[in-house]
Amino acid sequence: MKPGDRLPLVEKSVSQEHVESYARASGDFNPIHVDPEFAAGSQFGTRIAHGMMVAATISEMMTAAFGGAWLDSGRMKIRFRSPVYPGDRITTVGRVKSVRETDGGAEIKCAVEITRGSGEVAITGDAIVTVSTDRSSEPSEQK
Amino acid sequence: MAIDYEELVPGQRVSRRSYVLDGEMIADYMAAVQDESGMLDSRDSERLVPPMSIAALTVGGVVQDLQIPGGSLHVRQELDFVRAVPVGETLLCEATLMQNSVRGGWRFMVLESDVQDSQGRKVMAGKSTVILPVPGEDSSGAEG
């Protein structure tokens, strides 16, 4: 991989059912996610998806691009910029920012971003993974 | 018992929970995030959990233990995945408060988390920034 290469695109729709499943899995039943009456009176006016649920698509994209290396050495630093609502379709994109050689491999730094259907940016950040030299040369970028 | 956030001090452990990453939890997680990466099925014949499922449990535990109120915002997150984890593993998740300050009608809390497997090996570290509305103050000006 080289700077400028794009990572596999991830697109999916977010539903309230997904939010409820995430609440059960994580134990995060904050009312902003699951209580319609509470959420109606919030700054958002309705329920919103968990930010970490939305951010999971970044990890999915990095796993698709880098395989097991992401599970063992992945790092990410993200900022939640605006909420994602049930009913939104989200798009997760990434591109390689830099490739730095290390002992026996390479550290690949990628810019990542998630937008919702309206084009509003929901999450931005960086994801970094260390891969073996052989793995880094595999053609896993999006065509 | 309600938490008095003013009383929390940097360095204080605010969450300590143990989880078994069982099939039911992972099924709920996979259904929620619709993960289609297909990379979780095998390594040395073990089925691996998505690393963000560990982060989900860790942050969820903090939200519960700190009784993070509705109207709070999760504004930043850092994660380091150190070791892949198989389904069925037992994890110990701990979170420590690193910053607790108030400005502009919001309480800014920075929390560092550390997750170890059943053999005491680090599997994940994280750093979360969460802002909570301060009762009685105007909290309308924060970024999301």
Image (cartoon, coloured by chain):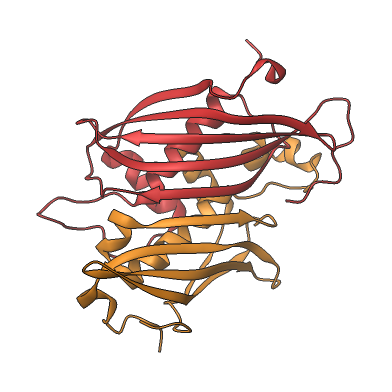
Chain colours: A orange, B red
Q: Residue furthest left?
A: B44
The residue positioned farthest toward the bottom in the image shown: A143
Coordinates of residue A125 in the picture (x, y in percent): 56, 62
Q: How many marks?
A: 0
B96 above or below B86?
Answer: above
The residue lying at 10 percent from left, 54 percent from top is B45
Which quarter of the image is occupied by the N terminus of chain B?
top right
Q: Indicate the position of residue B125 as horizontal and vertical percent values.
A: 41, 42
| x 38%, y 82%: residue | A141
Say which residue appears at 33% left-offset and 52% top-offset.
B50
Image coords of residue A140 (percent x, y): 32, 80
Above or below: residue A40 compared with residue B65: below
> Residue placed at 81% from the left, 39% from the top?
A41
Residue B36 visible at all:
no
Q: Quadrant of residue A14?
A: bottom right
In the image, residue B142 above or below residue B139: below
Quick check: A54 left or right of A137?
Answer: right
The answer to which image quadrant residue A119 occupies is bottom right
A30 horizontally vs B144: left or right: left
Q: Position of residue A59 (x, y in %)?
A: 42, 60
| Side of A76 relative to B51 (left or right) | right
Query: Residue B98, relative to residue A78: is it above or below?
Result: above
Task: Report the front residue among B108 and A20.
Answer: B108
Question: Which of the two residues, A39 or A59, is positioned nearer the viewer here?
Answer: A59
**Can residue B88 be seen in this snapshot?**
yes
The quarter of the picture where residue B11 lies is top right
